[in-house]
Image (cartoon, rainbow, N blue to C red):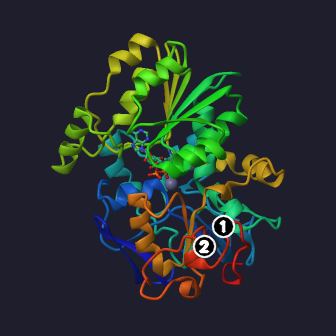
């Protein structure tokens, strides 16, 4: 089959690899129909994640059709349409029984490496490093899904792939971020980062009772999406002095709840700290640039909550932990316990409370995934969220001489479609 493989920093390629096989009676194999590119994939793409190996198949936001089932699988049969959580969980260990699925104790074959880095080993994840179990990922034509009766959710309605695929990660991640923020009715919630995770954190903050949402980024179309779809007030960290503005907008108190949806690769609008972070990262002294986290800690009101869905990798420098203690902040974080949220969030989509496809700007065939990674990384061409569709024939949608480019279906010139136009038949 064809699969997107990591070959080093800034180097992902569509390779021909062996088809996945059932290795355990609890496995299923799915044919992928849609697969997102996530901000977490960028940490791999940018070479920041230890224990990656050339040839690793990446991607962890997949959905598709079941083509094979192991003999012990009870919930699924061939032909079922499923969304697969990025977390691999056994369903029966100490942590799974508490629905702490991303802490599953039994699914990470890289546990020794993880323990050396973290003290304990979290669950295995699709499309990640050796430390997370090196499970082949979902930016591929086919995927082996271990513990199938515990992970995937069957889609029985006629919702489109684009409406449900983000149950695999970013919708539950935004929801858990808002839940972890401990929002009380009427609270002011500040969200750093208006990428896909930030966008869902904004949506879910409203669902959980926020009275006001302030979103921070610098990419114009992401700020625009936060205002239009997210009904948030926005701040641009290139032009606004974030701390001063947040304090001023909240009458001196600071936001009640702060969500860091940026993680390890914060940009810093030329601040000295940001320059030092970047220099240390460049020479390998640190893997993380925690500028957004520092800001969130400093801005958060006394006894407020800091929720951190953004991924950090290693040891963070210059974190004002005195402020955390001095102000009595609560910090909650973690890889999302995706399995916990699948059914309730699917119900919200089915009820029409939210249509997660609002975040998609680019749809590409697998062959164009490398170019799409670069666009998503550089935040160019209006790229907010890419969905890879392995079965899609991109040829009709690509302008001559531009073969390696991802196609922006909002771009009328590239597609011949009006921005609101229906999907071309090739994507149906
Ligand atoms: N916890 C989980 O289970 C989980 C799941 C999915 C993604 N994530 C993490 O969430 C984070 C965001 O993912 P994404 O897909 O939205 O990525 P993304 O790269 O598309 O978005 C990050 C956004 O942060 C903005 N940003 C950079 N520096 C900033 C700053 N100083 N202040 C405010 N905004 C800043 C960028 O402009 C960008 O729009 C990543 O770290 C990713 O690894 C975590
Ligand atoms: Zn992800
Ligand atoms: Zn478990």
Depth check: give the residue in front, 74 or 329: 329
Q: Quadrant of residue 286?
A: top left
251 with respect to 345 (left or right): left
Position of 244 relative to 93 (above/below): above
In this figure, which residue is indicated by the disc labeled 1?
A: 419
Q: Quick one: quadrant of the C terminus?
A: bottom right
How much space separates mark 2 and mark 1, taking CA atoms? 6 Å
Q: Dot 1: within a 10 Å radius of its alpha carbon, few (fewer than 14), some, or many (20 or more) residues?
A: few
**Foreground: 409 or 315?**
409
The quadrant where residue 388 appears: bottom right
Disc number placed over residue 180 in the picture, else none: none
Instruction: Note whether ligand 1 is within 8 Å of mark 1.
Output: no
Which residue is pictured at 53% across the width and 49% down the height? 222
- Give whichever of discs 2 and 1 has the lower sequence position: 2
The answer to whether the residues at label 2 and label 1 have Cβ atoms under 8 Å apart is: yes
Q: Residues within 10 Å of mark 2 (few under 14, many from 20)?
A: few
Tag shown at residue 412: 2
Point 35% across, 62% down: residue: 45
Per the image, label 2 sits on a secondary structure element best described as: helix
Q: Residue at x 34, y 21 (%)?
A: 321
Q: Residue most toward the front?
A: 413
Q: Is residue 50 above or below residue 189?
A: below
**Whole-percent x, y for residue 191 in the image:** 53, 35
* Image coords of residue 137 (percent x, y): 48, 67
Who's the residue at 41% across and 55% down the image? 132
Residue 188 in picture, x, y percent from top left? 60, 24
Q: Position of residue 352 (x, y in %)?
A: 81, 51
Instruction: Tell me the element at label 1.
Output: loop
Asked if one can make out residue 99 in the rendered structure from this viewpoint, the answer is no
Residue 225 visible in rendering = yes
């Amino acid at each position: 089959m064809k699969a997107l493989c990591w070959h080093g920093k800034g180097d992902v390629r569509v390779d021909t690899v062996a088809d996945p096989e059932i290795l355990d009676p609890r496995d299923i194999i799915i044919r992928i129909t849609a697969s997102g590119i996530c901000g977490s994939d960028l940490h791999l793409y940018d070479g920041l994640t230890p224990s990656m190996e050339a040839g690793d198949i990446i991607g962890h936001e997949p959905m598709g059709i079941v083509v094979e089932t192991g003999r012990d699988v009870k919930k699924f049969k061939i032909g079922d349409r499923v969304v697969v959580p990025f977390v691999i969980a056994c369903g029966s260990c100490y942590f799974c029984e508490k629905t702490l699925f991303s802490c599953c104790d039994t699914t990470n074959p890289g546990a020794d490496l993880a323990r050396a880095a973290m003290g304990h080993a979290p669950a295995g994840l699709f499309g990640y490093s050796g430390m997370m179990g090196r499970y082949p990922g979902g930016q591929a034509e086919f995927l082996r899904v271990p513990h199938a009766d515990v992970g995937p959710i069957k889609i029985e309605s006629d919702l489109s792939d684009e409406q449900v695929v983000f149950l695999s990660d970013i919708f539950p991640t935004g929801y858990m971020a808002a839940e972890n923020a401990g929002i009380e009715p009427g609270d002011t919630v500040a969200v750093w980062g208006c990428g896909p995770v930030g966008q869902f954190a904004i949506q879910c903050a409203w669902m959980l009772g926020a009275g006001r949402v302030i979103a921070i980024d610098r990419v114009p179309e992401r700020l625009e999406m936060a205002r239009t779809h997210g009904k948030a007030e926005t701040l641009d960290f290139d032009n606004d002095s974030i701390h001063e503005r947040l304090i001023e907008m909240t009458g001196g108190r600071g936001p009640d709840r702060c969500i860091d949806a940026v993680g390890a690769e914060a940009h810093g609008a030329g601040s000295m700290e940001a320059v030092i972070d970047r220099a240390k990262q460049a020479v390998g002294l640190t893997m993380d640039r925690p500028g957004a986290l520092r800001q969130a800690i400093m801005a958060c009101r006394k006894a407020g909550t800091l929720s951190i869905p953004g991924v950090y990798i290693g040891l963070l420098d210059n974190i004002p932990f005195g402020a955390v203690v001095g102000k009595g902040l609560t910090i909650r974080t973690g890889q999302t316990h995706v399995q916990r949220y699948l059914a309730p969030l699917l119900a919200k989509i089915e009820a029409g409370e939210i249509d997660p496809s609002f975040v998609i700007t680019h749809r590409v065939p697998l062959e164009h995934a490398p170019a799409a990674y670069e666009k998503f990384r550089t935040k160019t061409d209006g790229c907010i969220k890419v969905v890879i569709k392995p079965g899609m024939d991109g040829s009709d949608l690509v302008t001559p001489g531009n073969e390696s480019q991802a196609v922006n279906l909002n771009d009328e010139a590239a597609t011949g479609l009006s921005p609101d136009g229906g999907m071309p038949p090739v994507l149906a």
